[in-house]
Amino acid sequence: NAGVTQTPKFRILKIGQSMTLQCAQDMNHNYMYWYRQDPGMGLKLIYYSVGAGITDKGEVPNGYNVSRSTTEDFPLRLELAAPSQTSVYFCASSRPVAGGRTDTQYFGPGTRLTVL
Amino acid sequence: GDSVTQMEGPVTLSEEAFLTINCTYTATGYPSLFWYVQYPGEGLQLLLKATKADDKGSNKGFEATYRKETTSFHLEKGSVQVSDSAVYFCALNGDDKIIFGKGTRLHILP
């Protein structure tokens, strides 16, 4: 199992450019998540999905879009990149457990994005 | 809503010292509790977890006990090593999501 994979590892964008961060998991997990982590800070949830075709906003969704057409993939789209989006982006996945909660989240290695 | 509060860092200790990182939570129902660790330049990885009251999670010499009466899940290690230097996150599983604390940075001096 590769677990959760993310591409690219690093990227530099100019202000106003767009890009898609790729995330894939091979654990057949229903739940997938996108977080950002600013230097020296904790995690902030951007978007999440509880299954193919279902997505929901987290606490910082502005400037981002997602789609979930398959169980395996959960790409994050940045439109009109801004310096405030300079951060490390982590994708994670998990499976549901009884009571509507989620089990352990498994994280990818991250994408380091700089917007200049 | 559900929340997690953990002690602020950074925490600096000498090698072989005893470590405690405090974590308390607020939740409805019966969540599972987790400690995640993030080494420099890496993503988060599960360190240990406990799924019900009085359970003890343990891994790599770290331990934490799920205390429902004090709503706590403090992380302990008897003798830390330089390689334990990392950021530690306490967390619980809410509805569809994991609720993370803000993280505690740990520095271990040789």
Image (cartoon, coloured by chain):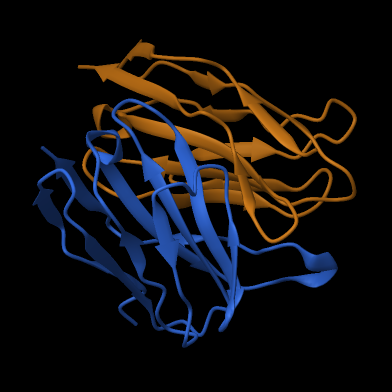
Chain colours: A blue, B orange
Point out residue B109 in the picture as x, y percentages from the top left corner. Answer: 24, 15
- Is A51 on the left-hand or right-hand side of B51? left
Q: Looking at this view, is A103 or B56 the one in front? A: A103
Residue at horizontal 24 percent and vertical 47 percent from the top: A81
Name the residue rendered at 43%, 84% in the picture.
Answer: A72
Residue B106, position in %: x, y? 37, 22
Q: Which residue: 55% across, 22% down? A: B21
Q: Is residue A107 left or right of residue B70?
A: left
**The one of A37 and B58 positioned closer to us in this rendering:** A37
Compared across the picture, whether B38 is left or right of A82 comes to right
- Quarter assignment of residue A88: top left
Quarter of the image where the C terminus of chain A is located: top left
Q: Quadrant of the N terminus of chain A?
A: bottom left
- The residue under the point 75% across, 62% down is A101
Q: Is residue A50 above or below residue A112?
A: below
Task: Out of B66 and A65, give the one closest to the viewer.
Answer: A65
The count of marks equals 0
Q: Nearer the viewer, residue A66 or B70?
A: A66
| Image spot of residue B39 (x, y percent) | 29, 40
Q: Is residue B9 above or below residue A79?
A: above
